[in-house]
């Protein structure tokens, strides 16, 4: 059985295309032959809506009503632990993406936020209150056993833009993290914040994993092994194939903030891969994995077809003459970018895996 690598896409700043990146990256990894599970761990359920084509909360409620009995969402999968039901956590029924074989969704749930406070209490007091001991390890356990049902290679976890207990848990128990960002002032500020948050979280996880009460739980809390793969900068307007000057200035400032403020504490805490691994895939000390421009008008066509922009057919693109040619050029450019991004990410993970095996 393949042990899936869990990759969380995390930034506590909103509006940085975490969900769009998860969908596009997941599709591309499946296109490259990987079996992929996308986990919607954001109570806003944007990934679930994007994949299933839902535009209103009522459509999600209908989905829950039809599928709830078979534990088809992340929240229903966690219910045995969080509501002390007399049964164990079982795998969730994944939603297969029919248009892209090998790609699956662990559906989100608007009600996942109801567990946030309970998890927060458990993560602070589980060493003192035996009844809470199964909660900190339950999310990791649910994702692992669910991924095993399809023999997944990679799990991509889309989380909310926040610093709550669910995000703390999912980031701390992931194998890798990717930090989506946007070229703006608030993303630069977020980098400074992450330089403090990520070390704090990983040290909490190390302490939690050492507690006998959590080691002996039905769902043991795992020893953390998080590594930061890098950043993805999106949502900028290009000019002649390059970011417009105003966006380039923020990209430069963001990259400098990553290199000077984020990398040093990550390095001290062992949260980075060896630099020679990054160098093999042309990733410098600013950890930039990719720069991907704004999708502009093509995003509507992507949403309408439930297909990534780079996978849209000529018929799905529509248009005529020069308009169609421009759209096709943009589609093909995005395809090259996501192809390179997916190859870079899998290459880094494979190098890391090989080093672990050799060690």
Image: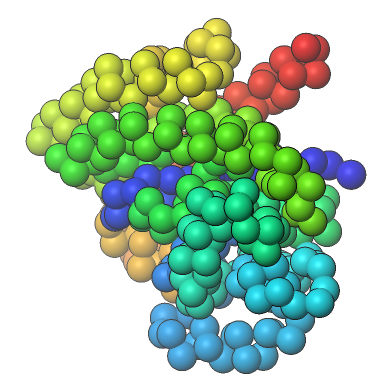
Placement of the C terminus among the 4 image quadrants? top right
Q: Nearer the viewer, residue 213 or 148?
A: 213
Farthest residue, direction right? 1
Left or right? Give the position of 180 relative to 189: right
Give coordinates of residue 345: x percent, y percent: 57, 31
Look at 66% across and 21% down and name the residue there.
352
Look at 29% across and 55% down and name the residue there.
15
Give coordinates of residue 243: x percent, y percent: 21, 34
Look at 81% across and 77% down and name the residue there.
86
Using the rendered image of the protein, determine whether residue 288 is visible from the camera's viewpoint: yes
Image quadrant where residue 103 sits: bottom right
Placement of the N terminus among the 4 image quadrants? top right
Farthest residue, direction left? 246
Q: Nearer the viewer, residue 173 or 277?
A: 173
| Up-down relation of residue 356 to residue 322 (above or below) | above
Left or right? Give the position of 185 relative to 315: left
Using the rendered image of the protein, determine whether residue 135 is visible from the camera's viewpoint: no
Q: How is the image coloured?
A: rainbow
Farthest residue, direction top? 276
Give coordinates of residue 49: x percent, y percent: 48, 73
| Up-down relation of residue 233 to residue 355 (above or below) | below
Look at 36% across and 62% down and name the residue there.
299
Give coordinates of residue 323: x percent, y percent: 29, 58
Left or right? Give the position of 244 relative to 110: left
Left or right? Give the position of 253 relative to 130: left
Image quadrant where residue 99 sits: bottom right
| Up-down relation of residue 220 to residue 261 (above or below) | below
Q: In the rendered picture of this protein, how many numbered marks are placed on residues?
A: 0
Farthest residue, direction front? 128
């Amino acid at each position: 059985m393949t042990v899936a690598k869990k990759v969380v896409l995390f930034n506590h700043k909103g509006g940085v295309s975490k969900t769009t990146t998860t969908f596009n990256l997941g599709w591309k990894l499946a296109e490259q032959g990987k079996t992929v599970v996308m986990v919607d761990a954001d109570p806003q359920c944007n990934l679930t809506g994007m994949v299933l084509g839902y535009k209103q909360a009522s459509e999600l409620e209908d989905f829950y009503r039809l599928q709830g009995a078979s534990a088809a969402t992340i929240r229903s999968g966690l219910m045995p632990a969080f509501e002390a039901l007399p049964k164990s956590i079982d795998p969730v029924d994944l939603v297969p993406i029919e248009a892209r074989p090998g790609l699956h969704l662990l559906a989100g749930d608007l009600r996942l936020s109801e567990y946030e406070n309970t998890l927060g209490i458990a993560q602070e007091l589980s060493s003192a209150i035996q009844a809470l001991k199964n909660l900190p390890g339950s999310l990791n356990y649910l994702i692992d056993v669910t991924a095993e049902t399809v023999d997944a290679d990679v799990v991509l976890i889309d989380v909310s833009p926040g610093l709550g207990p669910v995000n703390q848990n999912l980031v701390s128990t992931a194998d890798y993290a990717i930090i989506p960002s946007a070229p703006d002032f608030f993303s630069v500020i977020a980098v400074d914040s992450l330089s403090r948050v990520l070390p704090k979280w990983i040290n909490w996880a190390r302490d939690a994993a050492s507690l006998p009460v959590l080691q002996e739980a039905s769902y043991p809390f795992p020893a953390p092994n998080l590594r930061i793969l890098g950043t993805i900068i999106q949502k900028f307007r290009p000019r002649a194939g390059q970011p417009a000057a105003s966006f380039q200035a923020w990209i430069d400032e963001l990259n400098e903030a990553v290199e000077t403020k984020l990398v040093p504490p990550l390095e001290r805490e062992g949260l980075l891969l060896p630099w020679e691994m990054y160098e093999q895939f042309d990733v410098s000390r600013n950890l930039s994995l990719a720069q991907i421009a704004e999708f502009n008008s093509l995003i509507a066509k992507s949403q309408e077809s439930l297909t990534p922009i780079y996978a849209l057919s000529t018929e799905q693109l529509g248009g005529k003459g020069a308009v169609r040619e421009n759209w096709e050029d943009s589609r093909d450019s995005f395809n090259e970018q996501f192809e390179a991004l997916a190859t870079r990410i899998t290459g880094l993970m494979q190098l890391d895996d090989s080093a672990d095996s050799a060690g």
